[in-house]
Image: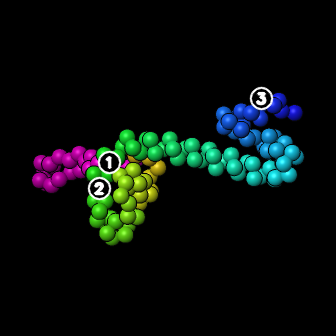
Amino acid sequence: MRPSGHITQVVKGKVGISPEVAVSFERVTSIPARYWIQLDANHQAALHRQAETQVLEERVDLVDRFPVRDLMRRQRIRPTDSKVDALRELLRFFAVADPDALEEVCEPPRVSCRLDRLSQGLVV
């Protein structure tokens, strides 16, 4: 049995809805436990998206390194007016999860080479 203080914390969004709490809610409200669990999952995802937006806002400078307008014109990324949304589109287009990985995409490749004295050819 859960103390009423825990229920208050759930209602205030301070703790998530565990399967045990979801079953308790189901008994009291007749609303299926899977609904309560999905409701909590949706809430957690929304919180994560808010945090992600803050991270992306700090990295919008990356957008200027890519031909965003051309990608939009060619319908490779969705049109957007926001740099944060453009950054999201670039992440999706390049199939990378975060701005650090996107930054690696736009860096020139690091190649070392030297001239081979015998053949006068380039050795990579």
Q: Position of residue 41 (x, y in %)?
A: 66, 48
Task: Using the numbered discs, state the Cα–Cα distance from disc 1 to disc 3 in whole angstroms.
Answer: 46 Å
Question: Which comes before the other along the chain, label 1 or label 3?
Answer: 3
- All told, the count of numbered labels is 3
Q: Which residue is mark 2?
A: 66
Residue placed at 38% from the left, 67% from the top?
76
Q: Is residue 87 visible?
A: no
**Direction from residue 42 to residue 119 in the image, left or right:** left
**Direction from residue 123 to residue 85 in the image, left or right:** right
Q: Which quadrant would residue 112 be assigned to in this image?
A: top left
Vertical comparison of 47 with 80: above or below: above
Q: Which residue is mark 3?
A: 5
Q: Secondary structure at mark 1?
A: helix
User: Amino acid under label 3?
Assistant: Gly
User: Amino acid under label 1?
Assistant: Leu
Residue 105 counted in the magenta span = yes
Q: Nearer the viewer, residue 40 or 7?
A: 7
User: Amino acid under label 2?
Assistant: Phe
Circle 2 crowding by C-alpha within 10 Å: few under 14, some 14–19, many from 20: few
Circle 3 crowding by C-alpha within 10 Å: few under 14, some 14–19, many from 20: few
Q: Secondary structure at mark 2?
A: loop
Circle 1 crowding by C-alpha within 10 Å: few under 14, some 14–19, many from 20: some
Contact check, label 2 and label 1, Cβ < 8 Å = yes
Q: Which residue is mark 1?
A: 62
Q: Position of residue 25 (x, y in %)?
A: 82, 44
Query: Which marked residue is nearer to the observer: mark 1 or mark 3?
Result: 3
**Direction from residue 80 to residue 38 in the image, left or right:** right
Image quadrant in which the N terminus is located = top right
Residue placed at 77% from the left, 52% from the top?
34
Task: Using the numbered discs, state the Cα–Cα distance from disc 3 to disc 2 in whole angstroms.
Answer: 51 Å
Q: Which residues are magenta?
A: 101-124
